[in-house]
Amino acid sequence: MIQIFLNGFSWIFAIGATALSVYVISEKKNQQLQSNREENNREFRSLQKQFLFPCLTVLFTESIQVPYLYVLFFYYHYGPMQIGALYIVGLISNVFFKFYSLHLLSRYGRRFLCLLCIFTGSLACTLKPFSSFAVLTLSRLFDGAFAALVSSPFQQWYTHQHLVTYDFPVEWMTSTFYIVAIGTAALFIIKQWPENKAIDAPIPMTSVMKKALGHLRSSPISLVICVVSCFIDTASQLFIFVWAPLFMKYRSGDYFSFGIIYSCLIASHLLGLLFQSSEFTRKISNSRLLLGSTIVGMTALYIGYSQLPLPLSRWQHDDAPYVLMAFLVFEFAMGMANPSMDALQSSFIPGPQRPALSSLSSVPITLLVSSVIWALFPSSLGGEQKIILATVICLFFASMGSALLDMVLTRKGYNAVPTHPDHFYLPTTQNPQQPI
């Protein structure tokens, strides 16, 4: 009976959340068109369609493999330590390519990186049907490259075309990135996308890093924002890794749809994103929204952790709905946290420094995630629960940093509204978006 309830609830929630999102998006789009008829400009709509088709296609192809990645490795009969190693390979590859992409971006341009993203993602998926550990390791290397390139080059290419090539009003960019945030083909990009590069390219990567570190030394607020972002991204990546093995332990031979549970998690994240941009939160500062979302996410995840028995073999079906609901609330909170954090970064970190700081931040994130997975997951007694608890601890530190940030910004009189319109929230499905 509980099994039927879980699957039924999951279907209803995923479909309902999607329908609500489509309705909200349509209403906001109609309001935007009525308030700004100039956005119906034919050249602008043409550029928007030219960008959205390949970008949304890439994000979609990334999303459909996420819920079954752990399941695939498990059914290839690999143990926890081997699966953890495969995940860590992807994380390390992601860090390397985030740094190397700064060099590639200045040397070859943004369209080249978009094509490289699609190429590496295609190779990664092509190799996954082979059960050889060496082949899967190579696939994870390509996964890391794909995840490192999945959002930033696409976003930067569109921003350059919008502002430099066509000189459209910066306000129009919001509607394009809103579609991407709420709503991703190589041949299309080759035929339709012109190449573009930074005006001052090429810039030595060491110079980029020095400028980024110099900004952190001169701006303690930016440093706190980066630290909080590291803890939030670490929590998100740990949760992405652990939810599938948890529900596999619950499955116990019964029919269970990982795809629909993943859809529920994504739908809940989407609802959080919609709520964060709604009228209810318009008068609340981003720092306060970030603080509230981290506290809610931490509390919900701890409640889910408290419902898990030790060992998981004693997990009763009656406990599953509470765990699922806790995870959905956690994803809702992360849906609010990500755009709030992004807005704070846009307010206090200059655009040229953000890619470099993102690459630098990926180093401690990868070290934390890899250490937790390697040390805790292979445990024969409660490895999954320990990772959930580690995720709660990361959110605790994120909430402490958010409280400090909100206190400082309130004292200084900042309202935490984005002041750099050249950057908009472009999430991936890894949650969001992060390396798988």
Image (tube, helix red, strand yellow):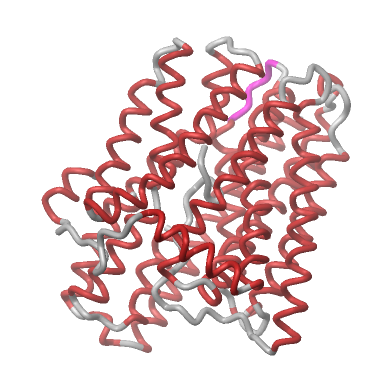
Identified at 74% across, 79% down, the residue is 408
Is 362 positioned to the left or the right of 374 in the image? Answer: left
Question: Residue at (64%, 62%) from the top-left corner?
Answer: 337
Tell me if 162 is positioned left or right of 298 in this view: left
Residue drawn at x 39%, y 56% as measured from the top left: 152
Q: Does the magenta stretch include residue 254?
A: yes
Residue 211 or residue 179, whichever sits in front: 211
Identify which residue is drawn at 24% across, 52% down.
107
Residue 384 appears in which quarter of the rendering?
Answer: top right
Q: Position of residue 156 (x, y in %)?
A: 33, 62
Q: Give the range drawn in magenta.
A: 253-257
Disc tally is: 0
Compared across the picture, whether 214 is left or right of 285 comes to left
394 sits to left or right of 19: right
- Relative to 230, is 200 above or below? below
Is 82 contained in the magenta span?
no
| Image location (x, y in percent) of residue 145 | 39, 38
Q: In the image shown, does 141 or 386 lie closer to the viewer?
A: 141
